[in-house]
Image (tube, coloured by chain):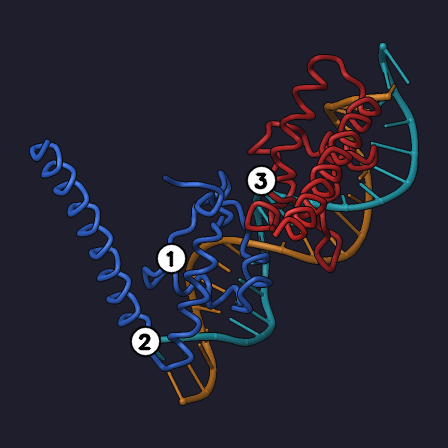
Chain colours: A red, B blue, C cyan, D orange
DNA sequence: CGTGTAAGGAATTCTGACACG
DNA sequence: CGTGTAAGGAATTCTGACACG
């Protein structure tokens, strides 16, 4: 299910190059619960390409004036959407099993 | 044609974690022409997942006692294989165009 | 040939805080 | 609330070189 896109291997400086967001902003979005980098043994943050994409979405929202808290709500709902989708998938699988 | 796998965004420390190869070895394989990282503006090396995979292959070859020069030959031939494959693809495309 | 290591410097990252608003 | 910045320290990376073999 996961792949290179989800491997957390990008340091904050590179994320800055990729997204245009300052390290300060990137760290702040973490304290606000929008993003969850891994850490190396000594604490350096590591991000995935998925994280980078999310940060770019966050940047867009912020430019529209959306506050971090609201963005967090949206992300929460989106996750719920994914969960529902997976549950629906499971139910369908069970249904199909009984059908045959 | 390219994707996340080919984006050069991984620093040498992370590559070390991922491959188990020492920074010294990783740099050495570069001087031997086996691997070609990008650089940040100030010279820090950046690798792709493809590079990481290649380094693991190189590590295997080295364990078998294959010298870097020989590994380079193999890589050269492999590239040639890719080129031929692409040329063949183009020829086939032209052939098929005339067929119809 | 391939890799380790000590050396010295430059650039990176981290945290907590003050600033503005 | 969101972001910049100066501060001080710790960890990273870089290059050129000596070592062994």
Quadrant position of the N terminus of chain B in the picture: top left
Tell me the CA gap for discs 3 and 1.
20 Å
In this rendering, position of residue C19 left or right of residue A4: right
Q: Residue at image x 65%, y 26%? A: A57
Residue B59, x across and y down, in percent = 44, 71
Q: Residue at image x 65%, y 52%? A: A97
Question: Could you say which is closer to the camera, residue A25 or residue A29?
Answer: A29
Badge 2 sits on which subunit? B
The residue beneath circle 1 is B35
Q: Secondary structure at mark 1?
A: loop
Question: Could you say which is closer to the camera, residue A80 or residue B34?
Answer: A80
Q: Secondary structure at mark 3?
A: helix
In this rendering, position of residue B39 left or right of residue B68: right
Badge 3 sits on which subunit? A
The crowd level at tag 2 (other Cα within 10 Å; few <14, some 14-19, many 20+) is few
Quadrant position of the C terminus of chain B in the picture: top left
The residue beneath circle 3 is A14
The residue beneath circle 2 is B67
């Amino acid at each position: 299910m996961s792949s290179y896109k989800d491997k957390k291997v990008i340091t904050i400086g590179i994320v800055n190059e990729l997204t245009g967001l300052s390290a300060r902003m990137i760290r702040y979005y973490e304290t606000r619960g929008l993003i969850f980098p891994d850490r190396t043994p000594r604490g350096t943050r590591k991000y995935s390409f998925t994280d980078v994409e999310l940060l770019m979405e966050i940047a867009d929202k912020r430019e529209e004036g959306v506050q971090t808290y609201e963005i967090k709500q949206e992300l929460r709902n989106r996750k719920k959407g994914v969960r529902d989708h997976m549950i629906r998938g499971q139910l369908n699988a069970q249904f199909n099993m009984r059908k045959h």
